[in-house]
Amino acid sequence: MELEGRKIIILVEKMYNDREFWYPYYRLKEAGAEVRVVAPEAGVTYAGSAGIEVRSDAAAGEIDPADYDGLVIPGGYAPDHMRRAPAMVDLVRRMAEGGKVVAAICHAGWMLVSAGVLKGKTATAFFAIRDDIVNAGAEWVDQEVVVDGKLVTSRQPEDLPAFLKAIIATLQA
């Protein structure tokens, strides 16, 4: 398995995009990774925009980035709720600063903006947050997936196959 022994975080908050959470969750597990669901609080059930629920394994403030290889941020409206929790934003920042893979799809770019990790990067996101990405110092491009170092970004659910291929390749590099 491609990711045997790798530990990955998937962030969650209410109103997450169900496809952007569950596709990476199962694809990364299928590849052999240990996947941990992290939210502002541990043991809380969060509902996605389609109503599918997931229970968090740990709180962001309890996570040591040194213990993980990467982090995935699904979109939907969840990133707007995530960035209201300082520990969630800090976790993204610390993962990026620690040279870990940080992957964001769709509106998850808001977390990258709030974490201050986009300056000088090339990234993509849902077109409606293009200005946010650019104003945070990144070059925004309209591509299904963009890899800039350890930063992996995609635009929308239709990009999920390319997004996961890029995440797995970046984790293997």
Image: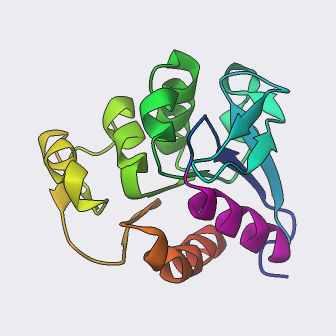
Instruction: Give 117 or 154, whichever is nearer the viewer.
Output: 154
State the image coordinates of residue 159 (x, y, percent, origin top left).
45, 77
- Residue at x-position 45% and y-position 41%: 77
Q: In this view, does 33 lie above or below 87?
A: below
Instruction: Give 67 or 44, whichever is nearer the viewer.
Output: 44
Q: Is residue 18 above or below residue 131?
A: below
State the image coordinates of residue 131 (x, y, percent, origin top left).
13, 47
Magenta run includes residue 26: yes
Whether residue 120 is visible: no
- Residue at x-position 25% and y-position 55%: 121
Question: Toward which corner of the image does residue 28 lie, by quadrant?
Answer: bottom right
Instruction: Give 91 or 18, whichever is nearer the viewer.
Output: 18
Magenta run includes residue 163: no
- Residue at x-position 70% and y-position 47%: 9
Locate residue 99 relative to residue 11 in the image: left or right: left
State the image coordinates of residue 120 (x, y, percent, origin top left).
20, 50
Q: Quadrant of the C terminus?
A: bottom right
Q: Is residue 167 above or below residue 134?
A: below
Whether residue 23 is visible: yes
Colour mapping used in the image: rainbow
Q: Is residue 171 above or below residue 101?
A: below
Locate residue 33 relative to residue 83 in the image: left or right: right
Residue occupying the far front of the picture: 51
State the image coordinates of residue 3 (x, y, percent, origin top left).
78, 72
Question: Toward which corner of the image does residue 126 lie, by quadrant?
Answer: bottom left
Magenta stretch bounds: 17-31
Could you tell me what secondary structure mostly forms the magenta stretch?
helix
Q: In which quarter of the image is the N terminus?
A: bottom right
